Amino acid sequence: MSDNELNLKAKEAASRAYAPYSNFRVGCALITTSGNIYTGCNVENASYGLTICAERNAIANAINEEGIIEIAKLVVYTPTPNPTPPCGACRQVIHEFGDPEIMSYCDGSQSKKHSSSELLPHAFKLKNS
Ligand SMILES: [Zn+2]
């Protein structure tokens, strides 16, 4: 599946976001090394702190279906003029499941491509192996 097709899936997921507080509707689509695609959208909460990002929901969705996963590629879509890479919390969670290529798309014509380790150098690891 092409980056553009994954972006369309992420954008579609963003349309389902529950974002009544920020109105910042984010979507994510990821492909695992086994070739399956999973999506997620952000789900906000009145307490704010319980809000879950699209990226973490997509990862939870993938694990719910496949068990332990390795992410090959992750695409995030934000309704912004410029690409917005994943937040710090999501970077740590993405890192848990590989060092995928992360593509950030937006409503503008630009996109950004990073590796997970580029976005989160010196990520936290419980075991230093
Ligand atoms: Zn996040």
Image (cartoon, rainbow, N blue to C red):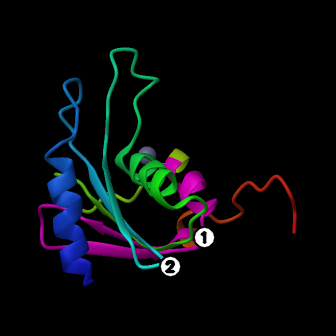
**Residue 54, position as x, y percentages in the image:** 35, 47
Check residue 95 for magenta coloring: yes
Q: Which mark is residue 127?
A: none
Instruction: Give the answer, above or below, for where 13 lies relative to 53.
Output: below
> How many badges with numbers are in the image?
2
* Residue sitting nearer the eye, 125 or 13: 13
> Which amino acid is tagged 1?
Gly
Left or right position of 104 against 120: left
Q: Please, which residue is most extreme toward the top here?
A: 47
**Residue 7, position as x, y percentages in the image:** 22, 69
Instruction: Give the answer, above or below, for where 123 lies relative to 32.
Output: above
> Which residue shows up at 87% across the image and 69% down it?
129
> Which amino acid is tagged 2?
Thr
Please identify the quadrant where the N terminus is shown. Answer: bottom left
> Which residue shows up at 57% across the image and 58% down it?
67
Quick check: is the Cβ at mark 1 less than 8 Å away from ligand 1? no
Q: Nearer the viewer, mark 2 or mark 1?
A: 2
* Residue sitting nearer the eye, 50 or 83: 50
Instruction: Give the answer, above or below, for where 48 lies relative to 29.
Output: above
Q: Which mark is residue 98?
A: 1
Crowd class of label 2 (few under 14; some 14 to 19; many from 20; radius 10 Å): some
Question: Looking at the image, can residue 80 be seen?
Answer: no
Check residue 16 for magenta coloring: no
**Residue 93, position as x, y percentages in the image:** 57, 52
Q: Which of the marked residues, 2 or 1, is nearer the chain's N terminus?
A: 2
SS at mark 1 in the image: loop
Q: Are marks 2 and 1 in contact (CB under 8 Å)?
A: yes
Crowd class of label 1 (few under 14; some 14 to 19; many from 20; radius 10 Å): some
SS at mark 2 in the image: loop
Q: Which mark is residue 33?
A: 2
Q: Which residues are magenta?
A: 90-116
